[in-house]
Image: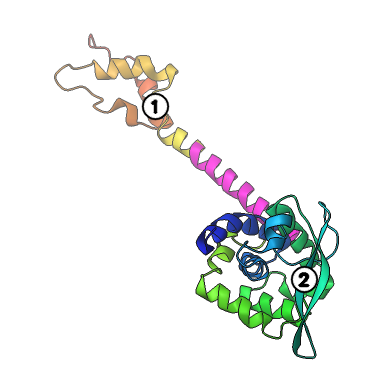
Amino acid sequence: MDKNGFIEKIAPLAVAKASDSGIPASLTIAQAALESNWGASRLAAEGNNLFGMKGSGPAGSLILPTTEYRGGKSVTVNAAFRKYRSWAESIADHARLLSANRYAGAIRKSGPEAARAVAAAGYATDPQYASKLIRLMETYQLEQYDEAKGEEPMTAEEKKQFETLQETVREQAKQIADLEKWTHPGIPDWAKEAVAAAVNYSKGDPLLKNPEQGSVDFYRIITVMHRRGLFDKNK
């Protein structure tokens, strides 16, 4: 799988999880790319572990060598890493980890801000961790996936105000519809006979040339005139 293919596969999962976790999708994608070597690491291939999460996972664990930084120097040690049944499961576990208070600075922030926050909180021992994540975000334009998730969820007060606004709009729409029915209702059944008499009063020059464009009051007047015999050709 090439890098673009990796992004295409993980991006929808990262965006979906960002909508409820508040973790920028750009951070999720960048961390996964860095930690799993774009999905090519043994841990990713055998354990669907995209983030180097240690311990025992839903599908058990893998013992693998890993590089740690101690006193500014890199050392290789063996560690147990979590195994997952899918990438989605790995992403969900990553989101649960970053939802802890320790990583609160990454929630609902821009990708670069979140990268600095997780690095400062000790997610990795690499002193260049934040810089590497931000470089990935910039190179592959990963922040576009943060825009895809849309606005932050509305608060309870905002939802209440929005519902009130919707109700107001519905009421205004009903009033407009009622007004239109009053001003341009079409020919009411009770006025059809009077309208027909007015239209047929003179074949050469009918009294009504546009009988369907009247208001309710107009049809009432036509009906009264008809009942008084004003459209009777014999009078």
Give the quarter of the figure containing the N terminus.
Answer: bottom right
Residue placed under numbered mark 2 in the picture: 65
Give the quarter of the figure containing the C terminus.
Answer: top left
Q: Nearer the viewer, mark 2 or mark 1?
A: 2
- Residue reaching furthest to the top: 234
Which residue occupies the foreground of this view, 151 or 234?
151
Query: Majority secondary structure of the magenta segment?
Result: helix
Q: Is residue 183 above or below residue 221?
A: below
- Quarter of the figure with residue 214: top left
Disc 1 residue type? Gly
Q: Residue at x 75, y 63 (%)?
A: 94
Badge 2 or badge 1: first in the primary sequence: 2
Binning the other alpha carbons within 10 Å of mark 1 as few (below 14), some (14 to 19) or many (20 upward) gives some
* Bounds of the magenta segment: 154-177
Binning the other alpha carbons within 10 Å of mark 2 as few (below 14), some (14 to 19) or many (20 upward) gives few
Disc 2 residue type? Pro
Q: Residue at x 83, y 72 (%)?
A: 101
Q: Which mark is drawn over residue 186? A: 1
Q: 105 left or right of 173?
A: right
Which residue occupies the foreground of this view, 163 or 41?
41
Helix, strand or loop at mark 1? loop
- Where is residue 231 drawn, in percent x and y? 28, 16
Q: Which mark is drawn over residue 7? A: none
- Quarter of the figure with residue 137: bottom right
- Quarter of the figure with residue 146: bottom right
Q: Residue at x 67, y 60 (%)?
A: 18
- Where is residue 13 drawn, in percent x and y? 64, 55
